[in-house]
Image (cartoon, rainbow, N blue to C red):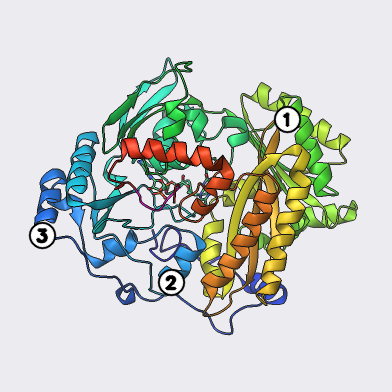
Amino acid sequence: MRWWGWGDFAHAPALGARELAFLADTVGLAPAPRPPVALGRVRLPSSALPAPVLDRLRAIVGADGVRDDHAERVAHAAGKGYPDLVRMRAGEPQGAPDAVVRPTGHDQVRAVLELCGQASLAVVPFGGGTSVVGGVAPLRGEHGGAIALDMGAMGAVLALDRRSHTVKVQAGMRAAALERHLAARGLTLGHFPQSFEYVSLGGCAATRSAGQASTGYGAIDKMVLGLRVAAPADDIELAAVPASAAGPSLRQLLVGSEGTLGVISELHLRVRRAPAQQVYEGIFFAAFAAGAEWLRELAGQHALPDVARLSDEPETAMSLALAGAGGVKGRLGRAYVNARGYRGGCLAIVGVEGTPEDVAFRRERALSLARRFGGLPVGRSPGEAWLRARYSAPYLRDELLTRGVMVETLETAAQWSGLHELHREVATAIGQALDACGTPGLVMCHLSHVYESGASLYFTFLARQREGDEIGQWRAVKDAASEAILANGATITHHHAVGVDHARFMEREVGTGGLAALRALKAQLDPAGIMNPGKLLG
Ligand SMILES: Cc1cc2nc3c(=O)[nH]c(=O)nc-3n(C[C@H](O)[C@H](O)[C@H](O)COP(=O)(O)OP(=O)(O)OC[C@H]3O[C@@H](n4cnc5c(N)ncnc54)[C@H](O)[C@@H]3O)c2cc1C
């Protein structure tokens, strides 16, 4: 993973002359490319761990399981949010862990936590490191140092129960590795966040992640049936059961705990039969409201596709303009759509997976209902292009940053009854905040993760970076968007989690009593406060 950005170092650039010209016209580009600094120029504070503590850590996880060299500390200094990348590219992360520790199993995790409690070291669980909300920031809290507890060596499948459709894994296992393991056996987990290629399953559970097919497969909270957690105070082990009425759900308190209560070491997950067929296609709507009404009606009829994603007008226009850079391959589609009078409309991507009979039935129902809302089916090419490019967009972000373009996303969810106001007001807040920064930009949104009662809105915005004050610019926009979200009674996050960025909004999200209850739970499980300080609960 590029320490300053996303994914594979060898990934080919996607922005060609056409896309750059579009960006220069719409948001503006830096006069000259601004590449990241060389690794050796990244400035870190020196490691604060005394040699005897390092020796004791090595005694627990082995000499190879403890690293405190510059490259490892840089690789664990931040997640992949916009401010993380801005700082990393400039070679100035906000600190780094004093050491990176890689346990291989639950007992080693427990022993590391005990040692860190005695030595007053903060522990930052680190799965894939893809947090976009500051979840893996190496904050120390009251403690003298911090370690990144990298779960990468805990990647085994422990058991597969084909009869019950469950799998038990170590929590550091990558989602992509599990999907490969399951595919070879005709099964799938069905969890495909855009960060799929790098996320760990423990990280997904700890953040209540939602994959792109969550409308059909559910988010991770629906998949976790049981789990094992090492908390500083004690272990918690919850057996895999399909459902339970034994009091409030402790499972659901641990799912989403973001490493602040303990370390998820093992997970029991529900799996499904792999679909025999997948059909992904595009439908154009004259306006966002018409497409949203179609999805609301499908949800009401319990007839939703597995993937349902409706771009608003600006996002559709952008996808078509950047077709060659991982967007919708749409020259033919665009001409057709324009000719049919849908110029300036909204594209929905619809994916249905299952047996051929099931797919045929569900597709037909979705398409015929779409026609009732004025939808124009535009065939499989946009859907298949989206499927092929679904993990490429993060690479584009790196290229945009090199060109001096800020690109950031934020997400929320609300009931249908307030969704349009929310869309309008958050987009307006972002646009006005960008204007106030003197960097007018593009604000786009899509509706996805559809439920009977509402849906998630996912905003993307692009603007010229305010050079020298990139973080101030970002914070101004983030604050404006967050205020608009909360003022509309929506959640501060549908799936990116809380981390550092949303922690100050938690009291408004769950109330004073709710926050106090969560803090009391933390005090019980983590009395010395060593677990991931500064995240979730502030
Ligand atoms: C380009 C991009 C696209 C993304 N797309 C999506 C998306 O489609 N859907 C979505 O939901 N999210 C998405 N995300 C956000 C991110 O990928 C998710 O939050 C993901 O679940 C994090 O998994 P991870 O293994 O990388 O966790 P990390 O980033 O390593 O950790 C996340 C948090 O969980 C804690 N943690 C990690 N492992 C454990 C453990 N075993 N026990 C206890 N705590 C732990 C960490 O301390 C941290 O607080 C995206 C991020 C990027 C950069």
Gap in Å between the C-alphas at discs 2 and 1? 43 Å
Query: Who comes first in sequence, dot 3 or dot 1?
Result: 3
Compared to residue 279, the image places residue 427 above or below, namely below
Query: Which region shows up in magenta?
Result: 532-536
* Main secondary structure along the magenta-highlighted residues: loop
Judging by the rendered image, the residue that carries numbered circle 2 is: 89
Q: Helix, strand or loop at disc 3?
A: helix
Judging by the rendered image, the residue that carries numbered circle 3 is: 51
Tag nearer the camera, 3 or 1: 3
Q: Helix, strand or loop at disc 2?
A: helix
Q: Quadrant of residue 269?
A: top left
Gap in Å between the C-alphas at discs 3 and 1? 59 Å
The amino acid type found where label 3 is placed reads Ala
The amino acid type found where label 1 is placed reads Ala
Give percent across and percent down for residue 256.
46, 39
Q: Helix, strand or loop at disc 1?
A: helix
Gap in Å between the C-alphas at discs 2 and 3? 31 Å
Give percent across and percent down for residue 361.
73, 24
Give percent across and percent down for residue 151.
30, 45
